[in-house]
Image (cartoon, rainbow, N blue to C red):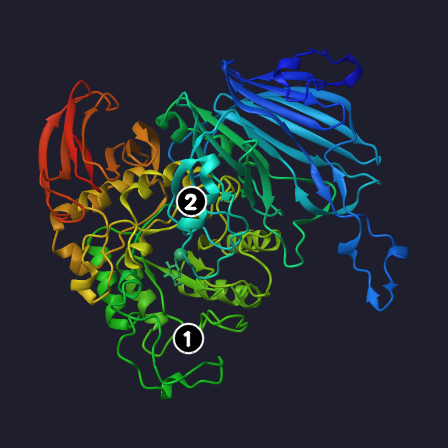
Amino acid sequence: MKRPALFCIITLLAAACSNPKATVLEELSSPDGKLKMSFIMTPEGTPEYSLAYGDETVIRPSALGYELRGTVKAEQIGYEGDEVVKTDRLEPYMFNRDFTVESIGRSGLDETWKPVWGEEDHIRNHYNELSVDLLHKSGKRMTIRFRLFDDGLGFRYEFPQQKEMTYFVIKEELTEFTLGGDYTAWWIPGDYDTQEYEYMKTKVSEIGPVFDRELVGNSSQTPFNRWGVQTALLMKTESGLLVTIHEAACVDYATMHLLMDPKELTFTSWLTPSADGFKGHMQTPRTSPWRTVQVAPDGPSMLASRLVLNLNEPCAYEDVSWIHPVKYMGVWWEMISGAGEWSYTWDAPNITLGKFDYAAAKPHGRHSANNANVRKYIDFAAANGFDAVLVEGWNIGWEDWANCGKDYVFDFVTPYPDFDIKALNAYAHSKGIKLVMHHETSSSVRNYERHMEAAYSLMNKYGYDAVKSGYVGDIVTPGDHHYSQFMNNHYLYAVTEAAKHHIMVNAHEATRPTGLCRTYPNLIGNESARGTEYQAFGGTKPPHVAILPFTRLNGGPMDFTPGIFEQDLKAWCGRDSYVNATICNQLGLYLTMYSPLQMAADTPEHYSEHLDAFQFIKDVAVDWSESRYLAAEPGEYIVAARKAKKTGRWFCGGVTGDDARDFTVSLDFLDTGRYEATVYQDAPDAHYKTNPKAYTITKQTVTASDSLEVHMAPGGGFAISFRKL
Ligand code: NOJ
Ligand code: CA
């Protein structure tokens, strides 16, 4: 329903505005009435919004809009003396003031939809909507659409097709989030190229100095400002409310970071630039991604929020029968830990594909993706009920892959001489196992797109239905970044092209998810954060796994690769790194770190030493009809119970950070009847540093009216599987 601005009920709530002359034009309430959003116009014609939860101000009046690159006029391109006047020197103009409101629309939705896979089998999408049509003094039009849910706010910019605005270039998006106070934040440094950081916990006013102190190196890294952070950004207000800023449906647009102004306590959006330095190349009609502010009274309700998924479009595919959850093992951890290699030979100082004769090269004898080793993994995975085995290092080129700016790195179709692609796939299939393809692009995106069709066709030929891709190193074309508009288009292109081949995608080092898996459910995983691999690169502190579900997982599942049973990498393979987690912590992750793609990342040998604990990984489901977060405090602990979609079996698990914790798990989530509960928990003397393998496994009969006492050691966890009697 739309009406002209003239008829708006103008409520002058000057107190709610930072600018005393600003006018609250409209108010919007969440369906349950707890959240209230105000839409404000300042006398300068700047649109603003604010957000309150009950009596508490979450976001103070915050400006909306853009700075755009000046329009290119033919007569402005030419010479000034000897110098060419470039388009980027044209005067930018502000598209965040000089607006008038043309009309205002209101609507809403209350629907329930079914995800192809997920934490639950149906999701309620319930919001009230306000749309504001704005006219800029230049004659250009823009709409801002707000959706207010019980669990937060989403809003986006919409640019209708119009003669006055056909193509335009974004210099900056200037969306503000002015906080109601100096909130505590769990943040990682803003960076155009990597998200593989540990989280810092500080007041937002302290980000800069802590950034200076804590920034650590990474391959391909472009931090942009010491006050810059990434989303999803989790914060806690003075009163204990949790607030998360993120984005939804980032399509054909750059990934958003946030830049803090500590004097005003304002975050402003900070987009990742393209190689030319501008932040977005737009053609109308177009919309921005949704900017999201989730608000929850406690940890469990924040983890249960599906706002980001709800703001994405419904599934784009008619036939989804080929998309399925995957529990897998991999020829992987042994290379990450240094016990094996991706490469085949040390004969060549560098490689030009097609010109190097691998058959004549001397193998170095450490190549993990060899026929015998892959068969060993297939045998173990098949014997233990897995779906798939990932094999990395199967294809030529790994001797020389991570070199700056190298364009033609891999061809994605030629196996090493000791990897018999046909025979290994046939062997795997005969045992009910699929191999998972691996495409490390080394960020030579052009090269990947060059070979993509052939690479996916090869997968079809041998019966692979899932690929793990990777983007290590600086992006080729040089100057581009992992989270730019161009790269975001590439990641989605890889997913939609894969869909044509009925292939599921798990992309590492790609941009952080914004809920696109709702629309494109063959995107079954992403890394896009610091995963388990860092336990082999010096270690990650225990609180990390109790933060990720609030931050990185907000936009979609993570291929975190849990399940490490051998912590002492030095004793195993000589790598000077230690896994900071008990065995029970690793079990708990299968419940707390939701993903339809779950790996058992350790080796068959290490699992064989603890077959009793490994039983939980064999049993645990990866797709759920129902999920309950029983307890959750960022960085401290997370406890979740979930009901398996196919079998109706319940599982429960928890992880803790640095501190030991004892928990009483009330079993009221169980259905009626008696169950056998198998409880895997840290032994009383377990500790991730000194005694990580100490656990107990006990069985008892329980019903929904019982509760269970469980113990978690520092860096520990627990897991329970229930079997109906
Ligand atoms: C980094 C990925 O995160 C890791 O899983 C992979 O093994 C290596 N790149 C090599 O592709
Ligand atoms: Ca990685």
222 to the left or right of 47: left
Q: Is residue 76 above or below residue 181?
A: below
Numbered mark located on residue 210 in the image: 2
How far separated are the C-alphas under marks 2 and 1? 43 Å
- Return the residue nearer the eye: 606 or 660: 660
Q: Is the shortest distance between ligand 1 and the CB of mark 1 under 8 Å?
A: no
The answer to whether residue 322 is visible is no
For residue 340, what is the image quadrant?
bottom left
Query: Is 417 displayed left or right of 445 in the figure?
Result: left
What residue is disc 1 on?
A: 396
Residue 670 in the figure: left or right of residue 38: left
Q: In what quadrant of the picture does the C terminus appear?
A: top left
Q: Secondary structure at mark 2?
A: helix
Q: What residue do we see at 54% from left, 68% from top?
A: 451
**Residue that appears at 44% across and 37% down:** 554
Q: Percent position (x, y) of residue 64?
A: 66, 32
